[in-house]
Each structure stands twice: as structure tokens, then as C-alpha cells.
Amino acid sequence: MTPRSTEETRLRVIEATIDLLAREGRDAVTTRAVAAEAGLQPPAIYRLFGDKDGLLDAVAEHGFTTFLRSKHVDPDPPDPIEDLRAGWDLAVEFGLANPALFTIMYVAPARTESAAFKAGMEILMGRLRRLAARGLLRVDETLAAQVIHATARGAVLTWLSLPENGRDPALLTTLRESMVSAITNERPAVQEPGPAGAARALRAALPDQKVLSEGEKVLLKEWLDRIATENE
């Protein structure tokens, strides 16, 4: 089997697994069922993916890659808070459209080593750095990312757990706005008393500074980290 035909077969198996997940749920995903869905013999699954866990890892990576392609990245959005809202909405919409795949991607075991997951995280951290640089971030960037992930995953899983006649779109809006309120300021923090907001804004701008050496940047970041989190 040539490398190209191997990759095509892998993709066929991954897509067959996703179809099976969507129709019948995770418990239906066995190597025998997936092989039948893909028109292969069960040993082929082991040759291509090692075992069922390897197959699910490949499915999750495919999901992260698909989601990553749907993301729009504006390096200088006119309104970074609206940009944050749009990113959150996109994540939730993807989860609601692909519930079984979303579960494989984001529910334990965590697949944070995925290259596509890391690329998506870099997009998110870019959004947060832009907020911080404008003095609009209320909390540390790492905590902000955790809050965004927790609220988006919680929104998807809660919505899917509800009967269809009990699904109120206001739930999603409320969770999103709670996230925005928790991690951002309505006014730039650098206009308010206290050094924490100014420290976060300066810390976010550090990578673009050319007047400091790398060692000086590391030292300054350490100081700014302490100032930015002194009241958290």
C-alpha cells in the first residue's frame, strides 16, 4: 500500500468512525463495527491505528483540524471583545453541530498534545493578548483561557443534556456574557486605579518590544506577573 493510499484509507476509517459516532454513539464504536462501516477487515484498523484508543486519537485530531479550518483570525479586530464573543460562539456552534465528535475531542482523556489543538489554543491566546494589550483583560491570560473553555464546554454539554423542548437560546447567551463579564473590563483597566491592569497590558505587549534584551524581557515579565496577580 502506497503512502497516499494508506492516508486515504485512514481518512475513510476516520470518517466512518465519525458517522458511526453520530448515528449510534460512542459505545457503538468497536474495531469490528468501524471496519464494517469502512468496508475493511478488522485487522486493518490495528495496522493503521494500533488499537481503538489510537483510532479515537486520530478522530479527535481530525475534529480539531476541521474546527481549526473554520476559525477566522483577525490580527487587529476593531472590537476585541466582540471578537472574543464570535470565537466563543463558533466553538459552541461546532459542538452543537457535532456532539459525538465534540465529546471525543474534549471529554477525558484530554488530548492537549494534538497539533491542531495547540494551533487553536494559539489563536485563543492571541485574542487574549490583544485584550490584555488594550487593558481590557480582568484576569491572567491562562485563567481567562480556562474560563472560556469551561463555559463553552459546559454550554454544549448542558444544552445537549436538555430535552429539545427545554432548550432556551437564552442559556447560551447568558453563559457567553457571564464569561465576558468574568474575564474582561467594560473600560480599559489602565484607566482605572491600581497597577494590575496596567501590568497585564504591558506584559501582553512585551513580545513586540525591541528595546529590551531577551533576559530583560524575562525579568520584567516576572515582575509584571507578580503585580498583575497580587489581588487575585
Image: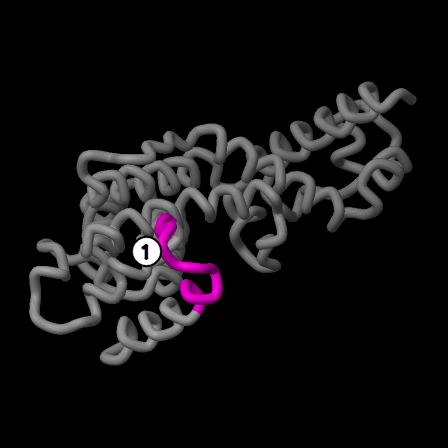
Count of marks, rendered view: 1
Q: In the drawing, does residue 70 fall left or right of residue 200?
A: right
User: Please, what is the three-letter code of the amino acid marked with disc 1?
Assistant: Ala
Query: Magenta stretch: residue 56 in it?
Result: no
Quarter of image, res 24: top right
Tell me the quarter of the image containing the N terminus. top right
Residue 151: x and y, percent? Answer: 33, 56
Range of magenta residues: 208-218
Q: Residues within 10 Å of mark 1 (few under 14, many from 20)?
A: many
Residue at x 32%, y 56% (from the top left corner): 204
Secondary structure at numbered mark 1: helix
| 10 in relation to 29, above or below | above
Residue 8: x and y, percent? Answer: 76, 21
Q: In the drawing, does residue 33 fall left or right of residue 159?
A: right
Pick the front one: 126 or 159 = 126
Pick the front one: 194 or 67 = 194
Residue at x 33%, y 77% (from the top left corner): 226
Mark yes or no: residue 65 visible.
yes
Pick the front one: 227 or 156 = 227
Query: Magenta stretch: residue 214 in it?
Result: yes
Quarter of image, res 22: top right
Quarter of image, res 2: top right
Mark yes or no: residue 162 visible.
no
What residue sits right under mark 1 in the picture?
204
Residue at x 67%, y 42% (from the top left corner): 28
Residue at x 44%, y 29% (from the top left corner): 70
Residue 148: x and y, percent? Answer: 34, 54
Residue 107: x and y, percent? Answer: 53, 55
| 105 in relation to 215, above or below | above
